[in-house]
Structures are given as C-alpha cells and as structure tokens.
Amino acid sequence: MLMLKQLFSPEVHDICPNCGEACAIADVLCPKCGKNLDELFEQLPDSGAPSVAIPKWIIFPIAVKASRAWRLLNSLILIITLVVPWEVVYSDMGFKPFTVSGLIVLLRSIPSIPSDLSYLLHSGCLFCVSMGLIAIGHLSLMLYTVLNLLYASLHIENRYQNFRKALSFCVITSCLVFLRIVTPMMLIAPAWGYWLACLGLLSSLWLEVADLVANRPYVQNPSPKAA
C-alpha cells in the first residue's frame, strides 16, 4: 500500500529552479513550466557560488510564442537586407553612382577571407585585416539568418542545446560587420540596407542574450536598490 501511495500520490521533495513550482521526486518535467528538472538541477551552481545579477531590461520574461515571433521578425529583416542596397559605389570618372545588394556584397567578400587574414602574419595592412574580419562577419550573418529561421519555424527551441550554442556563436561573430562603420572605403559608402542589417543584428543579439539569460536558473534579478 505504501508503494502504491507513493506512486499515485508522491510527496513533494523538489522545487523547480526555473519557476519555483513544487515538484514530486518522480517528476521528470516541471508540471508548471514544462522544463526538464534534471537539466535544470545540473545547471545549478555550487552552494557557495555567488549568483549573477543581470539588469532587468535584459532578463524581462519572454513567452515562447513571443520569442518565436521575435525570431521570425529578425529573420525577415535580415532576409530583406540581402536584396536591398548595402553599398553605394561612386565613380571618379563622372559616371552615375550605383548600388550593390547585400547578397552580392556578402558573396563577393567571402572568397577574400584567406588572403585578407593572411596579413595578420605580416606587419602590414590593417585595412585588409579589417576587411577579412568583416567578411567573416558577413559569413556568420548568413549562417545566423538561416539557422535562426529554422530554429523558430521548426519549433525546436528547447530540444537541441547545441543549436542554441551555434546561434549564439554566429550572432556574436556576425557583430564583426560593425567594423564596416569605422573602415572607410574609397568611393564606396554604406547604403540604407546595411543600416537595416545592423538594426536586425542588434535586435537578434538582444534576443539571444535575453533568451540565454532567461534559461539560466542561477541568474537573479537585481534588487530594487541595485537597479
């Protein structure tokens, strides 16, 4: 009888680290938030480890549907930037300026990565090194756009942790495209599509940070005085 009682009416022994719901010792998933309890407890730090206080504007709660919609919006913005002007090319021969789309800029810059980065081994051309880093940012931005769209549309938010790590890596390395702002190019200026890509990238970076922090149970909200 005792075994049957424990099976059908288990005593509460645990508290979900994610939402604070009381859980039975036999529960695998939290009955309230649906998180895997084993994974949550594995992520808990040692008892003596200090918790990390993150500003509230970073760790505001994001519903699953809202997060997915935000991801889809970011992907839509980044996809649009591939077909709109990224650069305006001027001529010193009196020809009319023309624009180059984002996809052409990205595809044109990627093959030059090895030659541009080879200047790191020399004393030399900081401009070429900067262009190589920007090209890496372009490649990462393309990968992030594809992966982010798959991540949101296939509803795999909490199933593949490695997928989330790949997203975080891509969005961080994509920030190398910001070097274009401080890297002047003769007769070439950024067009509005480039600034739209920067906006989409900043939005994506904010989402990835907020999503990553929100899934870390050891992160605590700052106290009102600290805020």
Image (cartoon, rainbow, N blue to C red):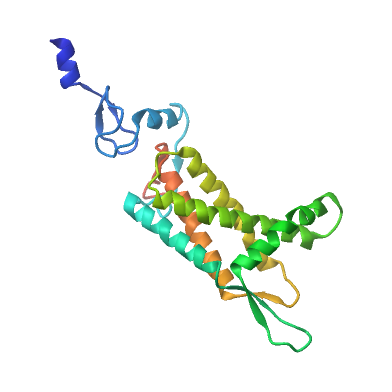
Q: How many labels does the image show?
A: 0
The residue located at (38%, 53%) in the rendering is 67
Which residue occupies the foreground of this view, 186 or 153? 153
Residue 81, picture quadrant: bottom right
At horizontal 46% and vertical 38% (from top left) the residue drawn is 161
Can you give x and y, in whole percent of width and height, for residue 171 in the image?
55, 52
Q: Position of residue 178 (x, y in %)?
A: 62, 62
> Taking 92 as reference, is 19 left or right?
left
What is the x, y in percent for residue 127? 77, 63
Q: Position of residue 125 (x, y in %)?
A: 82, 60
- Near-viewer residue (69 or 61): 69
Q: In this view, does 81 lie to the left or right of 56?
A: right
Tell me if I can see residue 180 in this picture: yes
Is residue 127 shown left or right of residue 25?
right
The residue sitting at 43% across, 26% down in the picture is: 47
Which residue lies most toward the left here?
Answer: 1
Residue 189: image quadrant is bottom right
